[in-house]
Structures are given as C-alpha cells and as structure tokens.
Amino acid sequence: MSEYGNVALLNAVSAAMGAVNTKALGVAIQGSLRSHQLSADQVKGARNGSLGTMCGFQVTNAHCRMTVVEGLAAAVNRILDKVPSEAANDPAARVLSNPGVAFHQL
C-alpha cells in the first residue's frame, strides 16, 4: 500500500511484473496479461502450476493505492527483490507478504 501519488513505486511494480511475465512467456506482451492468448504449452503450464506468470489488481481512493500481486512464490519473490523498499514500513508505504499462503488443488 502506498500514497496515491507514488508513481515511481507503481511504475517499478509494473515493470517488475512485466519482466517476470516476459521471462515466463518467452515474449513481451502488449498491455496486460489478460490480453495475451496463451499457447497450448503455456496452458499446460498454467494448469500444472509451472507457468510463472504474475497478475494482480489495484484498489485506489483519493489518498492511497493498494496493489495486490498474485503468482507462484518464486515469481512474487522476484517482484519483492526488484522493487526495493526505500524505507521501513510506515504510513506512506507498506509491503505485506506471506509466502506461506498458497493455493492447492483439492
């Protein structure tokens, strides 16, 4: 979560997600991952949990922006490594992460 006007942080997260998706897909995508058509092999990887793409969403108001990123733990860790904290968590910016939270097929 960050102040709404922290465009540098938003751009850094977007660039890091783009780099992760480019590596996972083998091609840079135009726009969001949602607009990319997966190949048959990529669909297999998505279904078996080996395709390391990232996605997410934002919730904003006039004062703050909450950015949620989702993906395999290794991909999320790459995002955290590429977007360094400028300071410890404070009211202006907070990073929350829990690598223990994962989805499992029942």
Image: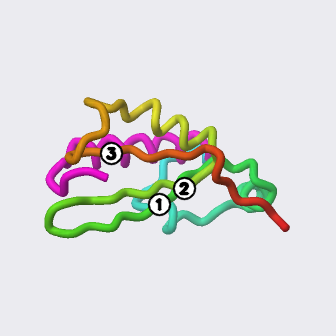
Q: Would you name the residue on which mark 1 appears?
A: 56
Q: Main secondary structure of the magenta part?
A: helix
Q: Which residue occupies the foreground of this view, 23 or 13?
A: 13
Start and end of the magenta stretch?
A: 1-24
Q: Residues within 10 Å of mark 2 (few under 14, many from 20)?
A: some
Q: Would you name the residue on which mark 2 appears?
A: 70
Judge whether residue 6 is colored magenta. yes
Q: Residue at x 32, y 41 (%)?
A: 12
* Circle 2: element type: strand
Callout in the foreground (2, 3): 3
What is the number of the mark on residue 2? none
Q: Residue at x 19, y 48 (%)?
A: 6
Q: Would you name the residue on which mark 3 appears?
A: 94
Q: Residue at x 31, y 39 (%)?
A: 89
- Closer to the chain start, of discs 1 and 2, is 1
Q: Does the CB distance between marks 1 and 2 fall below 8 Å?
A: yes
- Closer to the chain start, of discs 2 and 3, is 2
* Circle 3: element type: loop
In three-dimensional space, the C-alpha distance between marks 1 and 3, rounded to whole angstroms, equals 17 Å
Q: Quadrant of the C terminus?
A: bottom right
Q: Amino acid at mark 1?
A: Gly
Answer left or right for 18 relative to 2. Answer: right
* Circle 1: element type: strand
Answer left or right for 83 relative to 93. Answer: right
